[in-house]
Image (cartoon, helix red, strand yellow):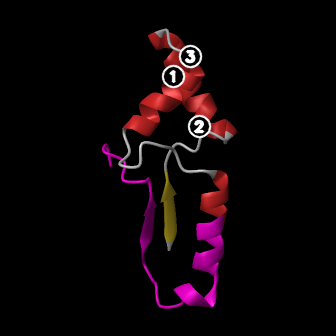
């Protein structure tokens, strides 16, 4: 089983990946986050708390019937 999140702005990894792109485009990190959020159906980015909740669910007995599954946590990313 795997979890597939996208662009959680609270993480250093996503900031390290996208902040240079924002700089190259001449926009702020906050504007870059808005661009990323605009690519999702929810028009926002997933939070670390939401990711932790899903990890807890997938590790619980409630998910015991799921095997070989990739859980899409992209909030419906349009570039998915």
On the rendered structure, is 8 left or right of 40? right
Disc on res. 14: 2
* Residue denoted by label 3: 28
Instruction: Tell me: residue 29, above or below residue 58.
Output: above
Residue 8 location (% of width, % of height): 58, 45
Give the class, few, some or many, for how many residues have Cα within 10 Å of label 3's Cα (few <14, many ≥20).
Answer: some
**Secondary structure category for the residue under label 2:** helix
Q: Which residue is depicted at the point 60% across and 39% down? A: 9
Where residue 56 sits, quadrant-wise, is bottom right
Give the class, few, some or many, for how many residues have Cα within 10 Å of label 2's Cα (few <14, many ≥20).
Answer: some
On the rendered structure, is 56 left or right of 18? right
**Secondary structure category for the residue under label 1:** helix
Q: Is there CB contact under 8 Å for labels 1 and 3?
A: yes
* Residue denoted by label 1: 31
Instruction: Tell me: residue 50, above or below residue 37.
Output: below
Find the distance from the CA under tag 1 to the CA under tag 3.
5 Å
Mark found first going from the N terminus, 1 or 2: 2
Q: Is residue 71 magenta?
A: yes
First to last magenta residue range: 53-80
């Amino acid at each position: 089983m795997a979890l597939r999140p996208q662009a959680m702005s609270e993480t250093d990894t996503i900031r390290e990946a996208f902040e240079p792109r924002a700089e190259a485009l001449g926009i702020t990190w906050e504007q870059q986050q808005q661009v990323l959020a605009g690519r999702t159906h929810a028009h926002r980015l997933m939070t670390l708390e939401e990711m932790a909740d899903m990890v807890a669910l997938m590790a619980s007995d409630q998910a015991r019937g799921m095997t070989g599954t990739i859980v899409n946590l992209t909030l419906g990313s349009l570039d998915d």
